[in-house]
Image (cartoon, coloured by chain):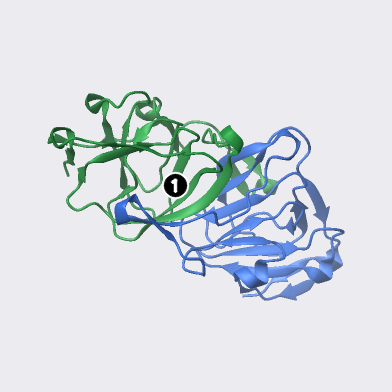
Chain colours: A green, B blue
């Protein structure tokens, strides 16, 4: 088993895997609604149309892993998947590059409760890793025909314990 | 000027206008991720493909109207528009049926901070009406060619002051 300490989530560090969904991190918002609203526009590449797909909006409620040992990664060959926290609490993000799963290339990030993530199609990622019980996330992913889930079980030696 | 007191937002009352995005209100969730996650699946009819459109994921930051007097409604002829609060605070929702704008048919709802809304294409609605300063909402709407905004300015006699 390996041990990895999470790094802070930044758009630059996450760029190989997708987008960080956050405000005040760069792009200027649009002023709309007669000045009452700022629109931080089009923050993620939603990619769900392959093979007759369409966007699905769902809410996930997750529990922390206890102990926090990662044993499986998944990827979605037909579409992107975005997660945005609804409770304002930090959570973990575990990813590895698309292609053959490479245990040496796993990256672990700690997201603030103000950051969402959008996994690009085929990017390996662990399922939802909240740090608080009953954590809610809005999810935008693909609904449609075809098999859109591929899983990779880590052999014992490659499993990852996440440090504090 | 008219005065209207908001009603609680429920899926049944909002059904003519679109969907309420919420958990624990009816449909059973799916158990996924080896039992770690509940998925409340596909809670809104995202309708953004007309005229070459695609889904856009944005974050809005809104300010309360002060005084809270509604003077303009808008509608999107090419797509749906979903709002999900990210701060957990209540907000207001003002809608009127699709078709010629009917001031007598305006409905005002008070949403909890755990409820989102998805406005169906062409449903008249007021722009974002938070009750707290700097309120953040995730928005899923349409990006693409064509004019997707139609506004209706209310004459003075039809303007609506929101009670309470």
Image quadrant holding the C terminus of chain A, namely top left
Q: Which residue is at the front of the view, B112 or A82?
A: A82
Q: Is residue B89 above or below residue A106?
A: below
Tag 1 residue = A84
Determine whether the residue tagged by mark 1 lies in a helix, strand or loop. strand
Asked whether residue B86 appears in the rendered view, the answer is no
Q: Is residue B66 left or right of residue A148?
A: right
Q: Residue at x 31, y 56 (%)?
A: B35
Q: Residue at x 33, y 35 (%)?
A: A9
Q: Is residue B143 left or right of residue A117?
A: right
**Mark 1 nearby-residue class (10 Å; few <14, some 14–19, many ≥20):** many
Q: Position of residue B125 (x, y in %)?
A: 72, 58
Q: Is residue B70 left or right of residue A157?
A: right
The single residue placed furthest to the front in the displayed view is: A146
Residue A153 picture quarter: top left
Q: Residue at x 34, y 50 (%)?
A: B33
Q: Position of residue A142 (x, y in %)?
A: 53, 42
Disc 1: which chain? A
Q: Position of residue B57 (x, y in %)?
A: 56, 41
Image quadrant holding the N terminus of chain A, namely top left
Asked whether residue B112 appears in the rendered view, the answer is yes
Q: Position of residue B23 (x, y in %)?
A: 48, 64
């Amino acid at each position: 088993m390996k041990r990895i300490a999470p790094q802070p989530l930044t758009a630059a560090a996450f760029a190989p895997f997708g987008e960080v969904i956050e405000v005040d991190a760069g792009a200027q918002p649009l002023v709309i609604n007669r000045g009452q609203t700022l629109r931080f526009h089009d923050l993620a590449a939603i990619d769900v149309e392959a093979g007759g797909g369409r966007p699905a909006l769902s809410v996930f409620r997750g529990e922390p892993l206890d102990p926090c040992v990662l044993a499986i990664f998944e990827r979605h060959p037909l579409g992107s998947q975005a997660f945005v926290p609804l409770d304002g609490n930090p959570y973990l993000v575990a990813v590895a590059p698309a292609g053959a799963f490479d245990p040496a290339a796993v990256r672990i990030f700690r997201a603030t409760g103000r950051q969402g993530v959008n996994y690009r199609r085929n990017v390996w990622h662990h399922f939802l890793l909240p740090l608080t019980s009953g954590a809610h996330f809005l999810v935008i992913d693909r609904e449609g025909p075809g098999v859109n889930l591929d899983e990779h079980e880590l052999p014992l030696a490659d499993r990852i314990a996440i440090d504090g």
